Image (tube, rainbow, N blue to C red):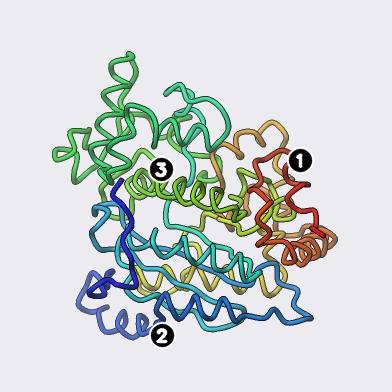
Amino acid sequence: MSGPVNPKAAPGEETSGNAKTSGKRAKARALDAFSRITLDEFEDELRGYRRPQAETALFDGYAFADYRGDVGDAGGGVVLAVALGAGEVRIVRRVSSRRTLAAALRPILMVAARAHVRILFGQDHQYGIPLALANELGLVGDWRQRMRQLFVEGELARSARDGKAGEFAAAVNASLVAAGRTPYFFSHTKGGKYGIPTSRPRPKDAPSERRLSEAAHGFPFCHVGDNGSVGGQSIVGIPHLLALLEDCEREQVPVSVWPFDGLSLDELAGHVAVEPYPSLYRDEGVVQTDENDAVACVTWMQRHDRDGSLARRLELRAVPSAQRARVQLEGWIAGVEAMVPSLVAGPRFRRSRSRARGRAYHAQISHRSHRPARGSSRGRARNRRPHA
């Protein structure tokens, strides 16, 4: 993976996500006329933020990065949107690539922790892969361990770290074929370029095709390189997410990832990463662009946190016990509620308990002795315990 660059010193700003048809371009420009802020300015706002005494929201700030998987680490196609408190959602200037995104998210989380500001954030890709595929590939351990084996440490990982989704897909397919299995990845438009099938090599209902949360929403991990597919973003995004988590752990900035570290928000310590799906949140009639998607995701997080409904929307303890281990290895799309009815009408005590624990955690978020939750009840309890 290429080294980080400084978005504060980037020579220019790159915008992306133009509307696809000329008839929509004017509407897209109007919708994309969002306020902008530099990284320095947002860091200053984080340092100066004071949480209102009567605040009931679980989080103080919100961030989401929308990007495409068909560009390299230094290429364009990345938009970072942020909001603080109940304030306006804004676009961070000079964040236009995965490298500049990495160089922006790290200081945001670290500055926020020192300022006792809790951040809810996400990135535009899947955080996990189907459990059946992980088993085929021989991955073992918890979510972090499995993702590191595939995207960081293993012999297939180099392409993912280098931001080459097509090359990674071809290598995984070749590995599966060598083991006597069916290829996995495909691309309708770039199959020839990547050296992978141009049509789906496995049945649509194969266990390896989709994660549990994608039964009704989202694109499968196996689909890369085409408009709307998410496999490429996930291949190149997961290594960056893991690197961000490791950097925060090294700096003793607690960051948890839902639902891998806990099936509900009241089990999670520190900043929290979730996996939004922009098409679920973008208002009907709004043109799909990188900026509109980023703003829609931040708006969704901010709105539901501040109206008190976020905890029940991210409540997965009602998942049948037989599926819980799968959910904590595959992940879950934030806001997908159809499979868990209690997400829509959960007991009120769960929400109030989550808010209380969220408020208590603001007193300890920057304490350097705390480590990110790792999924064990002992670890989570230790992270939540107020320090003297």
Q: Position of residue 117 (x, y in %)?
A: 63, 70
**CA separation in Å, label 1 and label 2:** 42 Å
Disc assigned to residue 63: none
Q: What residue type is disc 3 on?
A: Pro
The quarter in which the C terminus is drawn is bottom right
Report the residue marked by disc 1.
Answer: 377
Report the residue marked by disc 3.
Answer: 220
Is label 3 in a helix, a strand or a loop?
loop
Instruction: Please name the residue shown 76% across and 40% down the image.
Output: 377
**CA separation in Å, label 1 and label 3:** 32 Å
Quadrant for residue 4, please give it. bottom left
Q: What residue type is disc 2 on?
A: Ser
Neighbours of disc 3 within 10 Å: few (<14), some (14-19), many (20+): many
Is label 1 in a helix, a strand or a loop?
helix
Report the residue marked by disc 2.
Answer: 35
Q: Earlier in the sequence, mark 1 or mark 3?
A: 3
**CA separation in Å, label 3 and label 2:** 34 Å
Q: Nearer the viewer, mark 3 or mark 2?
A: 2
